[in-house]
Amino acid sequence: MKLHELRDNPGAAKKKVRVGRGPGSGVGKTAGRGIKGQKSRSGVALGGYEGGQMPLYMRLPKRGFNKPNRKEYAVVNLGLIQKFIDAGKIDAAQPITETVLVGAGVLRRSRDGIRVLAKGELTAKVVLDVTGASAGAIAVVEALGGTLTVKQAAVEAPADNAA
């Protein structure tokens, strides 16, 4: 194969339909928008508009609460850690920290910390130092003679408003 023979796979690059380019194109004149009406005009966002009636999303009751500063942890399973140890990307003899896990490519980023879950099988004796872990994961690591230490998150003291 030569450089000038390179081609995309058939059907890989689909040409964009150019609308409003005459009657021969099949989507000329009104460009597939029909005649008149709000949807035929430009700059229309019909999302939740119901002609002046109270929209459905505003009529329905709201429930629950979404905590704005909620911690979001990256999750890793013991089976995945074992897979990286077997591949030689993580050294089981050294302590495995969050920076080691991200550096080895187990996770892309640590977010607000890394939480270890017990899914999968761990066979190596490891020393893990992470932000969180399930009770099952701690039990599995300690059964193999390793240790799993969980960092305590800094708890903010409530502001004293009393004068």
Image (cartoon, rainbow, N blue to C red):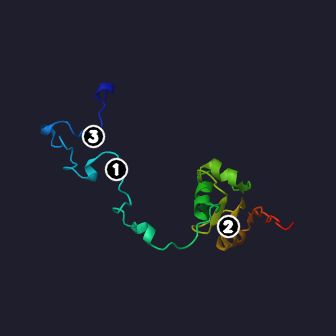
**Residue corresponding to mark 3:** 16
Residue 84 badge: none
Q: Is residue 90 visible?
A: no
Disc 1 marks which amino acid? Val
- In the rendered image, residue 155, in percent from the top left (x then y), is placed at 77, 64
Left or right? Give the position of 152 relative to 109: right
Residue visible at 16% across and 36% down in the picture: 22
**Residue corresponding to mark 2:** 133
Check disc 1 and report its element: helix, strand or loop: loop
**Residue corresponding to mark 1:** 44
Residue reaching furthest to the front: 52
Q: CA distance from mark 3 to mark 1?
A: 22 Å
**In this rendering, which labeled residue sits more in front, label 3 or label 1?**
1
Towards the viewer: 15 or 83:
15
In the figure, residue 3 lies in which quadrant?
A: top left
- In the rendered image, residue 153, in percent from the top left (x then y), is placed at 75, 62
Mark nearer the N terminus (2 vs 3): 3
Residue visible at 25% across and 49% down in the picture: 40
Q: Are marks 3 and 1 in contact (CB under 8 Å)?
A: no
Mark nearer the N terminus (3 vs 1): 3
